[in-house]
Image (cartoon, rainbow, N blue to C red):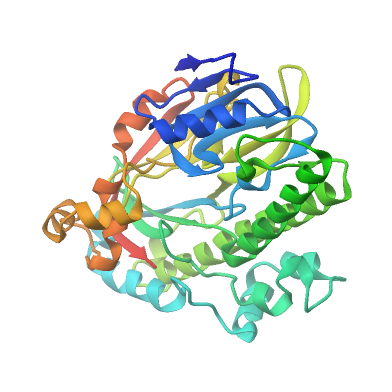
Amino acid sequence: MRVIYDQSRQRVPIKCWADDADADALRQAVNVASLPVAFDHVALMADAHVGFGMPIGGVAAIQEAVIPYAVGMDIGCGMSAWRTGVTRGKIQDHLEPIIGAIRQRIPTGFEHRTPTAGRKLVEAHCPELLDLLAGTDPSKAFLSGHAKIIEQIGTLGGGNHFIEAQVDEEGGIWLMLHSGSRNVGKVICDHFHRTAKQVCQRAGVEVADPALSYLPIDSLEGKAYLAHMTFAQEFARWNRHVMMRICQEAVTRSPIGGDVTGIEDIINIHHNYAAEEEHAGRRVWVHRKGATSARRGQLGIIPGSMGTSSYIVRGLGNPESFVSCSHGAGRVMGRKEAKRKISMDRFKQTMKGIQFKVSPRHLDEAPDAYKDIDRVMTNQRDLVEVVHKLRPLAVVKG
């Protein structure tokens, strides 16, 4: 970890675990560190790269305010992982139909369910979501309305969202998925970012980047954002829960279903969110944008790119990172750049031995578009310890 502190531009220092952070990501971190509401320091995780407003892989403790774009568009985006209890030897002959069943039952990309199908899944797997919607305006609830919210439950999305079958060092099979609050979170983020800009302008608050406009926690707008953000986080958690249940059913209904164990033993975590926590003796709102909580003893998930390893980790509770760690490998190429620079032959080579239909539309998600996950893990060895290293066997993408 290195410290970056230019007192002419920053109110607080930056503590950086990324040994390859690009100039744009560092510039964004300086902008965050210059905010009048920034507390103690800004932390950049080992996977940090340029984002919108705050770098992805950025962690900031904010005093008495919340920054919509420091949480991100996909509020509550995160990971879920389940150790099936099945060994690689037993699943090998059944993996393809299991993955096929998952693809058939989980919409990807921009696909949604019908409200009727979504409601059936909610009633079966997360009736608590209906409790959260109770008493809200069916046409306007959380800026989306009941029908649009429910039709997105149990849907994966596109981009870097995925479902993978993986194998650990002991030959055990895991299912892992990455997804969030879908369009529910985006609508909330966009609305309250516009509101934050207006609030800052009215108050005469100048920020280095309008994308870092913020809302006072005790304002009506701030309280409204927190309520909407909390709902989006819960929706994201239930969205992953429903998809993992569908994945579990694909395994349990297969010929190896009798070998399955630990149905309830699922890790389900956010990496785009804000939470009130105590750090350095003060209550602050910790914004983790593409970063994972890593309290001492807390289990976490750090995925690589498709085609590379992922990790189950245990937090070490390091206060220097606001008890956080990276959320993945982090990009080294933008999506357009990756499509220009990575050849299909190279893409196929990096995916060799993994069940996945390589196509030009996924070039922006090729392994070469991401950092070396093992290097990322080495750079944050003071933040987490490795519990399991997983290798991908099959990948589902939107």
Quarter of the image where the N terminus is located = top left
Up the image or down, 95 lies above or below 117; here it is above
Residue ID at (22%, 56%): 340
Residue 87 visible somewhere in the drawing: no
In the drawing, does residue 144 fall left or right of residue 203? left
Residue ID at (65%, 58%): 190
Residue 159 visible somewhere in the drawing: yes
Q: Position of residue 358 (x, y in %)?
A: 22, 65
Q: Quadrant of residue 67?
A: top right
Q: Quadrant of residue 213?
A: top right
Q: Position of residue 131 (x, y in %)?
A: 80, 67
In this rendered view, identify the residue nearer to me: 13 or 313: 13
In the drawing, does residue 331 fall left or right of residue 122? left
Q: Position of residue 193 (x, y in %)?
A: 68, 52
In this rendered view, identify the residue nearer to me: 231 or 355: 231
Q: Position of residue 29 (x, y in %)?
A: 53, 30
Up the image or down, 244 lies above or below 58; here it is below
In the drawing, does residue 365 fall left or right of residue 322? left
In this rendered view, identify the residue nearer to me: 278 or 127: 278
Up the image or down, 273 lies above or below 320; here it is below
Up the image or down, 364 lies above or below 124; here it is above
